[in-house]
Amino acid sequence: MTQAAARPAGRDGQVPRGFLRKAVPLLREIGDLKRVRTADSGGLSMGERAFCRSWAGLVRGADPGRIAVRECAAAVAGARLAGIDGPVLRRCGLAADEAVAVLERSVAQHADRMDPVTSGLLRGALPELVEEPCGGPAPGFAVVLCAQPRAGATCPGRPRLMVEPPESHGDHCWAVAVYGALLARAFGAAPGDVFLLGLAHHLHNAVLPDAGFAGEELLGEHLPAVLARLTRQALADLPAALAACVEPLLALREGADSPAARAFHAADVLDRVLQVRHHARAVAFTAEQALEELDLVHPCAVSGFHRAVLDAAEIA
């Protein structure tokens, strides 16, 4: 994922419709990492852990484009492997090449959802994912954003629709960063820029609780100054060179006139709608779907006995 990679599929502000239709199933699965937790996560989702890990790497001076590649590779592999990441595979006793092969199998299941160049770059980054991350602290705002809930869908003049559990701003910003980097080539954008903008676009919510669009409308004329003031406070926690990279990218949120802005806004709106659809899908979920579509009683040495038990109990 470099600036030199390929020409855009969607020039002149056009939306790359075919590419987006193809990519959405993968983005939906990646988004589910907002809801995956492991015993050693301290309560953070896989998305929140990646959000903090990305900011920690940026503070250490890592290149945003390189972090975008690594985190997109981790996200695509995790779409099917969930919490079974590279370090877990190594702790389970797999050699480095064996762990990489498992990650490759997972990424390969989504190869047709990405352009070939991006798919190749992600596969090339997998060997970096099988060792324990370097660590280091994330900025304070990143930790707070993982604890700050998002408002969900709100509309001025109407009561809020509450859905539980709410996602965090860390989850949302991570998802927008990853989606944006995966979509960047289709819009002719630099993935590292879109990734960094996605990570940073809610810095103000480290202080400002989220009341959604309805709350913003009520803040009215105060909103621009509040957002600017709180964003400056968060940027002050970053190394000067990193803050100087982030600040001009944040200005791109005001329009869809550049490739990076279009890739970012595409990722942002897709994540917001996919999040709502997740809640709708969860409410509509039935036992029949689990049994008939997801093979809850999957083929194994004792599946015949399992089915006999369910028939006898009359709950299948």
Image (cartoon, helix red, strand yellow):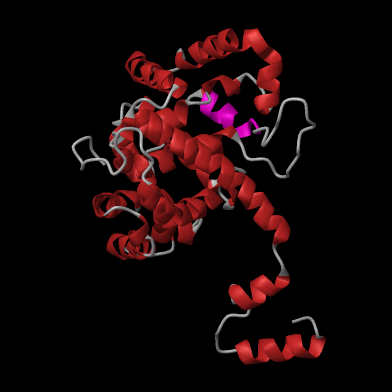
- 20 above or below 141? below
| Residue 85 in which image quadrant | bottom left
Residue, far left: 4
Please provide percent x and percent y for residue 179: 43, 43
Looking at the rendered image, the quarter that the C terminus falls into is bottom right
Report the number of discs: 0
Nearer to us in this view, 157 or 238: 157
Lateral position of residue 106 relative to residue 295, left or right: left
Inspect the magenta stretch and tell me whether residue 146 lies in it.
yes
Please provide percent x and percent y for residue 88: 44, 57
Lateral position of residue 224 relative to residue 162, left or right: left
- 253 above or below 164? above
Please provide percent x and percent y for residue 219: 68, 14
Q: Which residues are magenta?
A: 141-149
- Which residue occupies 62% across, 50% down? 277
- Which residue occupies 33% across, 31% down? 259
Nearer to us in this view, 198 or 81: 198
